[in-house]
Image (tube, rainbow, N blue to C red):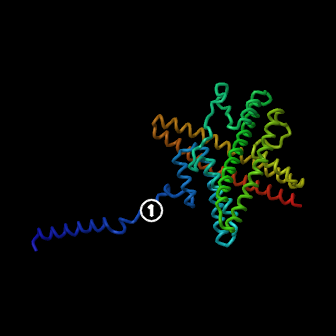
Amino acid sequence: MNMSSVTFMLISYLWIGVLGSKYSRDMNEPKPTDSKNTPEFRIAKINQVWEKALRMQLPPVKQSELHSDLKIQEKEELQWKKLKAEGLDKDGEKEAKLRRNFNIILATYGLDGKKDTRPIETNYLKDHESKDSGTFDDPRLEKLWNKAKTSGKFSEEELKNLQREFQHHQEKIQEYNIVMDAVSRTEEIHKNVISPVEADVKTHALHEKHADLKEKMRNLNQGFERLRKISHQGFNEDSEFKEPRVIELWDMAKRANFTEDELDTLKEELSHFQTKVEKHQHYQEQLELSHQKLKHVEALGDKEHIQRNKDKYDMLSEKTREIGYKMKKHLQDLTSKITRTGLRHNEL
């Protein structure tokens, strides 16, 4: 074999080796997934909702609120799957409630695929308002708010607290409308039911939703009456709490016929909860400011400056989500505790 033949054979082997490595299993196996591509949530449908929200570019505070709601929803759905595996929830009551809560989340954040008819901004009295005064979709709330803010009965801090109460009430109206829409759809489905077994299940679900609607309407009426009273008389100096959600829970507890000792214990727990809510609000404000600053430095184009602000924004975003989840879970636990104990007392 001459030299040129040996050289040719060596080159051939090398080329085959390259091709072999190129098409080998190691070369074609997918690389380990980057941590950034790891799904945010374990349940596929919840993760899809989150990814849709990211694509929609919800405002940072709204995005943080949604993350907390989805995290609670996921935790409850995973718990329900364990119950189902153990043969519990045979009547599907827990499953129906989870589905309703999920639909409420979708509708609340405009992720249900429906056109949102709620006005993002209203021109009503816009020329006569300050930038941060805010307006309300409900005409009764709008009228009451304008009376309150021009009455001269409130300090700047009190007016800020009152506005939060009005906003909270508007959110309650929105939730009521979502549940009412769900009831209407259930009634429509109910009409088309043929099987007697299905009819019993649908009737039970319908009664539950009507009861939920009735309770929400009662809370709305009581909440509006409280706003009307405060707007005309001003804040009571002896008022126990200033955060709307805490005030609502405290009013629920007082109506539920708790014992004095139980009320004292609950009052202390609500004080801790109010501190948690205030901390969450602080981080929400810082997150919004950080977002505005990040947009500003991005416009300037300084990469180092952008990265520093992005790191701070990401840190605040994560912290706000964490505190938001803990706050909402605490709210859920308190509401359940007050409702459950109140029902027990009322049955005695």
Which residue is situated farthest in the bottom direction here?
1
Q: Looking at the picture, how far across and down is residue 302, in whole percent? A: 46, 37
Badge 1 density bin: few <14, some 14–19, many ≥20, Cα 10 Å: few
Does residue 289 lie above or below 81 as drawn?
above
Q: Is residue 24 left or right of residue 308?
A: left
Q: How many marks?
A: 1
| Residue 307: % across, % down | 49, 43
Residue 225 appears at what percent x and percent y?
Answer: 81, 40
Location of residue 27 in the rendering, given as x and y in whole percent from the top left corner: 35, 65
The quarter of the displayed image where residue 60 is located = top right
Residue shown at the point (67%, 72%) measured from the top left: 86
| Quadrant including the C terminus | bottom right
Q: Name the residue that disc number 1 marks.
A: 32
Which residue shows up at 69% across the image and 69% down it?
90
Can you see residue 317?
yes
In the image shown, does 93 or 290 lie closer to the viewer? 93
Amino acid type, mark 1: Pro
Quarter residue 85 falls in: bottom right
Residue extending furthest toward the top:
128
Give whichever of 6, 220 is nearer the camera: 220
Q: Camera-side residue: 40 or 182?
A: 182
